[in-house]
Image (spheres, rainbow, N blue to C red):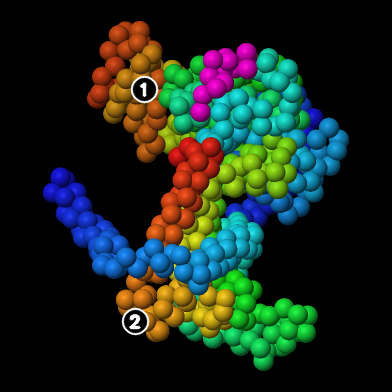
Amino acid sequence: MLHIKSIVKSIGEFTLGPIELTVGNEILVILGPSGSGKTTLLNVISGILNMDDGEILIGGENISKEPIEKRSTAIVFQEDTLFPHMTVMENITYANVGREDIKKIIDIFGIGKILDRSIDTLSGGEKNRVSLARAIVSKPKVLLLDEPLSSLDHPIRKRLSIDLRKILKQIEIPVIYVTHDRDIAWEIGDKIAIMSGGKICQIGTPEGIFKNPKTVVAAEITGESNILKMVVIKRNGKEHIVEWGPYKLEARVDGLENDKEICVCVRPENIVLGKQKKGKNWMKGEIVEKIFKGHRYAVELDIEGVKDQIRAYASLKQNENIKLEKGITLGVYFPKESIQIVSNK
Amino acid sequence: MKNKISSIGILGGILMIYYIAPVVSLLFWNANNAIIPSVMNEDVISAMITSVGTSIVSVSISCILGIPLAYFLSRTIFRWKNIVLFVVFLPLVLPPIVSGMVLLTLFGPGSILGLLAMSSGIELTQSLVGIILAQVFVISPFIVIATKVGFDSVDEKLEYTSRSLGRTKIETFWKVTLPLSMRGIIAGIMLAFARSMGEFGATIMMAYYPRTMPTQIWVSFITGGVEKAFPVAIVLLVSSIVVILLISILGQEVRGSYAPY
């Protein structure tokens, strides 16, 4: 179990933390945009950077003052950090472990045939497998992964991320995986922590965070989102009426006062497109752009009476049925559950 | 593109000819069969042994003191770093004769250190110690600068990775940093050795005796003119080329076993 207690680290103008985090024998993905402090957090946990304040405990033992080599926190970087003057086997056994310990890991990563090869002859995917195998062979108490798959081509990355999750689940130690790639986060993480401006702004299961993002950053990094400004005009228990331009929409938002301006997120996949209808939460929108996305279409819509442009998705079948074309006007429906309030802080 | 490469080749070629021509010219100089007697001359043999021996010792001392300094300069950020680097460069910008004068003020017979050493029976000038003191002063910057470049070229993330795999800082230095910096270190050793074999100005100020090869050439020149100095110069030239080739071959062996790029 990894406990991070109120750690703070300032580097110039940037401040990481204070951060509180508990990671059991699970895979925690830290998802955040560039410059949010993900790598700094890993560097502080691994001991590469000294923290200004706080404590780090692994299995109840305070390792805050220990040097890197005494922390048992193997780190795998985004860049290739295999030792180029050693063979694959020499790299894997670098951590002073017995050969019997490594056989299983070599089999799991499928690198048995390249053990005698020099590092400069390996492909990107092979290098990643060797780096990860080397880190796991060292029997760390915590494994820190700093975007280790980001340099790979999409198909290799996808295949390796599936394999990696299976392997990481087998080793049963706390794993922190840092990335800005939400697809990798969904593939690998048991839990996801959203990081922004040096702080963790939300933590939860992948599904929970996707469905209920608490901040604009969480909404935008976990998927495409329409971030819109609305005003609460009527409150009735959990049911609210929110005003968006000329529209009065039913929404389910907790604990808000009347006349309060709020920021909401509406996921494009939750927006319903159809023939023009009158009724609650129905609006009129004109298609200004239509983008083919492989398994569906994304359409940009100008909503009548508001300045915001929104994005919605339409399936290939819907495209045939409704005849989606640039310039046509159609009905746009926001289900009340789809209107998620988010903090813009 | 081809024209550009040709132009670069011509310009580089002119410089190569400028390096090689005087050497070849010296080797083909009409020595009147004076080279063999020069090689057999007791003073020349003694000077050669002194030059090679002191150079080996000076390069070794420079490595022992210079490599840790280079590592410190490469891996540490501190306020006065540029001043430290300036100090390292200082012996390179001083004319060798001035370096000798500076060293004399510190180690000369009238200096405190000179008197202290004398009372312990050690002569800091006019001795092998004096030659080594002069050579280390002049050649050690080559080791520090070239080795620092070597250390700079090693990604610190490799060192962090090594330590996160349980290796200590010292183990990481020996197993990762040093092997990967070998190219810079060997370049520094070659430069330092070559410079040490040819060092004259500072050496002659610190030690006229025992004579090194450059001092022997100078003595031959002032006592017998160019005719007498040339055969000894050829001996120095050939011995320097042999030593540098040996270091180069040794360096390739070491590089081959450590750094594949």
- To the question of a shared chain for discs 1 and 2, the answer is no
The residue nearer to you, when weighing A295 against A53, is A53
**Relative to B113, does residue A298 appear above or below in the rendering?**
above
Is residue A21 rendered to the left or right of residue B126?
right
Q: Residue at x 51, y 70 (%)?
A: B42
Q: Quadrant of residue B17?
A: bottom left
Q: Magenta residues?
A: A106-118
Q: Residue at x 49, y 84 (%)?
A: B98
The residue nearer to you, when weighing B90 against A58, is B90
Determine which residue is flagged by label 1. A298
Query: How far is disc 1 from disc 2 in space, using C-alphas?
Result: 92 Å
**Relative to A283, does residue B55 appear above or below in the rendering?**
below
Residue type pointed to by label 1: Ala
State the image coordinates of residue A82 (x, y, percent, origin top left): 56, 34
Name the subunit of mark 1. Answer: A
Quadrant in which the C terminus of chain B is drawn: top left
Q: Secondary structure at mark 1?
A: strand
Q: Residue at x 47, y 25 (%)?
A: A122
State the image coordinates of residue A330 (x, y, percent, origin top left): 33, 20
Which mark is drawn over residue B254? none
Determine which residue is flagged by label 2. B225
State the image coordinates of residue A21 (x, y, percent, origin top left): 74, 37
